Amino acid sequence: MPDPLLRVDNLVRRYGGITATDNLSMEVVPGELHAIIGPNGAGKTTLISQLTGQVMPNSGTIRFAGRDVTGLPSYKRSRLGLARSFQITSLLKDFSAIDNVALAAQAHDGHSFRFWGNARKERHLRDTARSALERVGLGKRADIVVSQLSHGEQRELELAVALATKPQLLLLDEPMAGLGVTESARMVALLKELRKEVTIVLVEHDMEAVFALADRITVLVYGRVIACDVPDAIRRDEEVRRAYLGEQHAVTRHD
Amino acid sequence: MKPKLNASNAVAALMCAALILLPVYSAATGNIFILTLFTRIVIFALAAASLNLIMGYGGMMSFGHAAYLGIGGYAVGILAAEGIGSGFIQWPVALVVSALFALLIGSLSLRTRGVYFIMITLAFAQMAYYVASALSRYGGDDGLTVYKRSDFAGLINLSDRTQFYYLCLGCLFGGLYLIWRIVNSRFGLVVQGVRSNEQRMQAIGFHANRYRLVCFVISGTICGLAGALLANNTDFVSPAVMYWTRSGDLMVMVILGGMGSLFGPVIGAIVYLLLEELLSQFTEYSGLILGPVLLLIVLFARGGIMGLLGRMRRA
């Protein structure tokens, strides 16, 4: 296996008496689409937030592209090529779609202490933004204010924003959340395209999508990794089946 | 963004034209009072515009903005009292001291959000107020008379009412132009993005607070200029210009005119100060009328007067 792009060792994050991330270790290798699944409250979003720096772990280390990023604030990790989408859509609601994406491109194009020129007229920022919008199928909706976009479009815009930062690793927190059947299908098709270009960590509840897309799957229960393998092996894994895929009552075993 | 022909832009254009032509009207009718009143209005419009930069565009509810009026004013007043009458020294000092003060309170208060930010900016302004009150050498509580207006080596005579008015108006237009450029620049988009969703801006790679702080300093500096103008206008500076009610007045002007709109604070300053002036002729309790007016604006016209005008176009 090649050197991991992302390597997490013994990560712990507690909230009061609850251990949301419990001595968690995992690796993501370049080029793979690595899915993370687990029941509600398994600590998936907490994990993503620690990877991107919105939440700091109590202990453990996170290495990204060979560099220890455990103590770095999120804006610095973003500059290293770590991008995320949010489970609950988190966009600049009063900005147009293209402004949202162009700002992401701007963040990775030198500092922004430029006070005079009109940023909306900067060709290369607009072009980068437009092509990211076209990637996700929002080319025609560029000038619409975010609050006027449908939920599905906002999910796609989340992705365009992440793409515009030219990430090495894309962390997607439930990109399918709240999408209808057609929209979900579009999103799966889109992710199939994207995975050819960028390493992806995908947190998702939609099992059909996960098993269709993932190279490897990590299963999280109560903040712990109970399995990490290729989809077929995960499907067959007894513990995973008990904990998650179907037999719900078995989850209590992990108390 | 492209300028469009709509009600709010038309009003802004008319307002600018009226402000430019005002001295002509004043000279033709011999009405000097209106010129002095509008000189004051223009100065406060500049201060309100600077507050709008952080409050409207940056989402930073500073409740201590009048401090810069005082700091700019005292810079002029103190230097004048010490025998340094040149505006080429007084004004840069006013700007630099205001910027430094903004840097100090910004770097401390921007660690907080919401109500705490409001309270800390208020506390700093009140501190400035009490410091000024304690400056017994410079008048203390009673304030400091500026016996001679800033001297610009014959370039412009600040004691001439019309020249001084145009200087103030030039500063206002210059300030608005600067703010307009900033708001549409890379920097401005980042600041507005942080207002809209700070977490998102961090996640795409912006160190949000650095941009907020610089914006805070720019705003304070522009307001310091308004302070230097104000001291020249009244030939006097006292701690009262820094009192928290003054900061409140500035906030009201911004909200009344329309937060986050370029000309909102100008129209807000005009309406607020004209109402105050008019009402004071009939009653001592002008607040009894101004208060409900503000309440109605906040309840029914979130975007202030400019927001109302903007909606007229669509209706």
Image (cartoon, grey):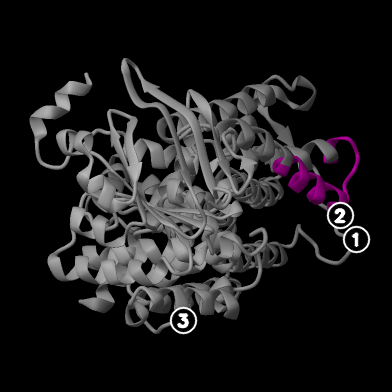
> In the figure, is residue B208 to the left or right of B277?
right
CA separation in Å, label 1 and label 3: 39 Å
| Residues drawn in magenta | B80-99
Look at label 1 and name its amino acid: Ala
Q: Residue at x 20, y 53 (%)?
A: A207
Residue B226 lies, in percent from the top left, at 64, 51
The front one of B170 and A56 is A56
Which residue corresponds to mark 3?
B3
The local crowd at label 1, few if under 14, some if 14 to 19, many if 20 or more residues have their Cα within 10 Å, is: few
Question: In the image, are marks 2 and 1 on the same chain?
Answer: yes
Which residue corresponds to mark 2?
B88
Q: Chain of mark 2?
A: B
Q: Is residue B62 above or below residue A188?
A: above
Q: SS class of the residue under badge 1? A: loop
> In the figure, is residue B203 to the left or right of B209?
left
Foreground label between 1 and 3: 3
Q: Residue at x 60, y 61 (%)?
A: A108
Foreground label between 3 and 2: 3
CA separation in Å, label 2 and label 1: 9 Å
Asked where in the image residue B79 lies, by quadrant, the reply is top right
Q: Is residue A146 above or below residue B57?
A: below
> In the figure, is residue B258 to the left or right of B122?
left
Look at label 2 and name its amino acid: Phe
Which residue corresponds to mark 1?
B153
Q: Is residue A143 above or below residue B104?
A: below
Q: Chain of mark 3?
A: B
Q: SS class of the residue under badge 2? A: helix
